[in-house]
């Protein structure tokens, strides 16, 4: 049940009848003043201005033609807002409908194919906190869209073909790597090798030659490369599993997988006169992008030495996603610094006809996770903190909190709860922030029983479970009866019926904090309700209604947390 849509349909009819729909369809928002109504139509003033008539009168006429089923009152407020409230019996009917459906009566329509490109770390390095946002924002979006009916294709576009391999191979010529070498060791070697690369000209040259040799298929180099890729993937998969992120090996489509397409693409771009040869390089000049001197920007797609670039690979990749994967829409969870890169890839691919001009391409960029001093998340020695360290620390902290509450808890249970709560805390603290902004990561705030945290929501969920444990007669819930008696119960019902529109809005804006805030609000409302009204000791009729309400709250929290990739707990 989508309440907003329910209202919209009614007003659409009236707008058409009054011949104003073509000027503007009804614009619906939640009412600012709750005493006037739940929703409000707030573009009547604009339409009246265009028609040069009185807004209040127009609003009155529109309201006259509304089908009143489900509505308790319509209040017109100055200068021309139309406020709508819902009828009690309509709310009861729709709440009742939610009870026995798995999806809480939320619509599921098969929708188009969407590729979601997320996490995508570079190989031969350990994942660090900088990879967290892309990984969990992308994963939650994939879960949400799948829930809403999209055909989701998850892609982990790992960086497995870059210069880092040339650098490592050049450095490794006498250091053997076998399948038991740890990623930590490779990472440390890489740091040393990179330093040498930056400082030593000859080494730089050697590293570049190694990269070309690798890219041309040198057997020995390919074998080292394969080992490094395997070791990195193994470690990364462990992290995804710990983080409860749904990225499996089958979702990996790394940069190297598009190699075979590239020579043909370069030829094709030259043939189509999109790319030209200049000073040994192959370049695409784009009118849309200007360089510092105001000239058309040149995007190199093949270097003098024959190697191709990150952009070239992404052009092949997008072609593949459209032609082979049949994507109608692609969402990239990539750092904001790559905005221009993606725009260039899209522009070249459209020009070349590899993807349709109107294809939906979205860059869901995100801000940085910062330390309390507003500085990047680094260790004292200046290295970015590894994702494994962050996860470990969160689990340790979560365990400390649990031990304080339950000193006698078994070791096994402590570990289980510590993981679920520790991981939930990191994920929620990130997902609940506005995606586009930097945010400050604070250990104290993320693991608190009070405030907008995963723990608070998880705890509300377990509280509801424990109420149900105390109920002996489960048949209460089977009764069709439901009667909303007080304002709190009415408000809870409205909130619960708004879940579907929250999911749709979260999806549309790609902003998971909308869903987080909703789940938090719902947990707060539950808490207040439980404090004020007795559930277990109420009269039978009241008890039935209240149990139904908290059952739906429980289900809503469960689905919501599932979408965020956070576990619910039966016991705490
Ligand atoms: N590997 C890249 C990086 O670490 C991110 C890849 C994003 N996806 C893409 N299709 N370019 O910055």
Image (spheres, rainbow, N blue to C red):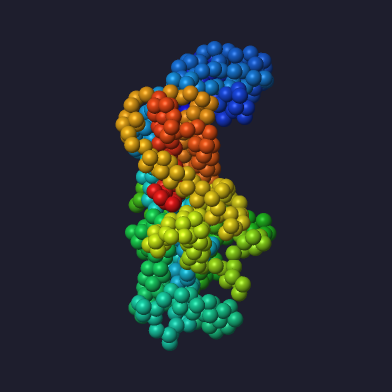
Q: Position of residue 562 (x, y in %)?
A: 41, 47
Residue 280 relative to residue 223: left or right:
right
Q: Position of residue 65 (x, y in %)?
A: 52, 13
Q: Where is residue 570 in the image (x, y as percent from the top left)?
A: 39, 48
Residue 134, placed above or below residue 113: below
Residue 236, placed above or below residue 40: below
Nearer the observer, 434 or 49: 434
Residue 567 relative to residue 193: left or right:
left
Query: In percent of the image, x 48 and y 15: which residue is there?
Result: 68
Q: In which quarter of the image is residue 369?
A: bottom right
Q: Quadrant of residue 46?
A: top right
Taking the view exactly as shown, the residue that stands out farthest to the bottom is 174
Q: Where is residue 456 in the image (x, y as percent from the top left)?
A: 51, 48
Query: In percent of the image, x 62 and y 61: which residue is there?
Result: 371
Query: In percent of the image, x 36 and y 37: which residue is there?
Result: 471
Query: In percent of the image, x 34 and y 52: which residue is there?
Result: 324
User: Does the rendering let one see residue 317?
Assistant: no
Nearer the observer, 115 or 316: 115
Residue 235, placed above or below residue 548: below
* Number of marks: 0
**Quadrant in which the N terminus appears:** top left
User: Does the rendering let one see residue 87?
Assistant: yes
């Amino acid at each position: 049940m989508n309440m907003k849509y329910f209202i919209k349909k009614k007003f659409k009819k009236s707008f058409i009848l009054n011949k104003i729909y073509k000027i503007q369809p009804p614009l619906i928002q939640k009412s600012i003043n709750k005493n006037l109504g739940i929703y409000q139509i707030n573009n009547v003033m604009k339409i009246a201005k265009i028609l040069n008539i009185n807004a209040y009168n127009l609003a009155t006429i529109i309201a006259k033609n509304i089908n009143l089923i489900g509505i308790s009152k319509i209040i017109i407020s100055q200068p021309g807002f139309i406020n709508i409230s819902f009828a009690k019996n309509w709310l009861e009917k729709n709440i009742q409908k939610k009870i026995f459906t798995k999806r809480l009566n939320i619509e599921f329509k098969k929708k188009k194919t969407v590729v979601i490109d997320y996490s995508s770390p570079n190989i031969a390095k350990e994942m660090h906190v900088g990879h967290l946002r892309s990984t969990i924002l992308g994963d939650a979006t994939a879960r949400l869209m799948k829930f809403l009916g999209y055909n989701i294709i998850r892609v982990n576009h790992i960086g497995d073909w870059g210069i880092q391999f040339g650098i490592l191979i050049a450095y490794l010529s006498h250091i053997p790597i076998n399948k038991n070498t740890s990623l930590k060791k490779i990472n440390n070697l890489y740091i040393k090798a990179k330093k040498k690369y930056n400082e030593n000209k000859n080494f730089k040259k050697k590293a570049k030659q190694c990269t070309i040799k690798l890219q041309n298929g040198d057997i020995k180099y390919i074998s080292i490369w394969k080992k490094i890729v395997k070791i990195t993937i193994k470690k990364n998969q462990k992290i995804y599993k710990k983080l409860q992120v749904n990225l499996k090996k089958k979702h990996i489509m790394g940069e190297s997988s598009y190699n075979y397409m590239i020579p043909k693409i370069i030829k094709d771009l030259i043939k189509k006169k999109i790319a030209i040869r200049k000073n040994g390089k192959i370049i695409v000049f784009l009118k849309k992008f200007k360089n510092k001197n105001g000239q058309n920007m040149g995007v190199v797609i093949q270097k003098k030495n024959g190697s191709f670039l990150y952009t070239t690979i992404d052009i092949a990749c997008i072609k593949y996603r459209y032609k082979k994967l049949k994507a109608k829409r692609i969402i990239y969870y990539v750092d904001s610094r790559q905005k221009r890169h993606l725009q260039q890839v899209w522009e070249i691919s459209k020009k070349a006809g590899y993807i349709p001009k109107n294809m939906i391409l979205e860059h869901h960029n995100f801000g940085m996770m910062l330390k309390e001093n507003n500085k990047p998340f680094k260790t004292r020695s200046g290295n970015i903190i590894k994702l494994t360290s962050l996860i470990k620390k969160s689990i340790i902290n979560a365990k400390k909190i649990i031990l304080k509450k339950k000193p006698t808890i078994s070791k096994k249970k402590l570990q289980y709860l510590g993981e679920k709560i520790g991981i939930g805390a990191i994920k929620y603290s990130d997902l609940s922030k506005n995606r586009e902004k930097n945010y400050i990561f604070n250990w104290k705030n993320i693991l608190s029983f009070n405030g907008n945290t995963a723990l608070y929501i998880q705890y509300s969920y377990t509280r509801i479970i424990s109420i149900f444990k105390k109920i002996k007669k489960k048949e209460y819930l089977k009764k069709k009866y439901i009667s909303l008696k007080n304002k709190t119960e009415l408000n809870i019902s409205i909130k619960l019926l708004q879940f579907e529109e929250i999911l749709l809005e979260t999806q549309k804006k790609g902003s998971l904090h909308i869903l987080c805030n909703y789940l938090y609000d719902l947990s707060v409302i539950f808490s207040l309700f439980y404090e004020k009204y007795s559930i277990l000791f109420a009269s039978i009729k009241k008890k039935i209604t209240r149990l139904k309400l908290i059952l739906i709250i429980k289900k809503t929290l469960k689905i919501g947390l599932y979408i965020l990739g956070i576990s619910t707990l039966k016991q705490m």
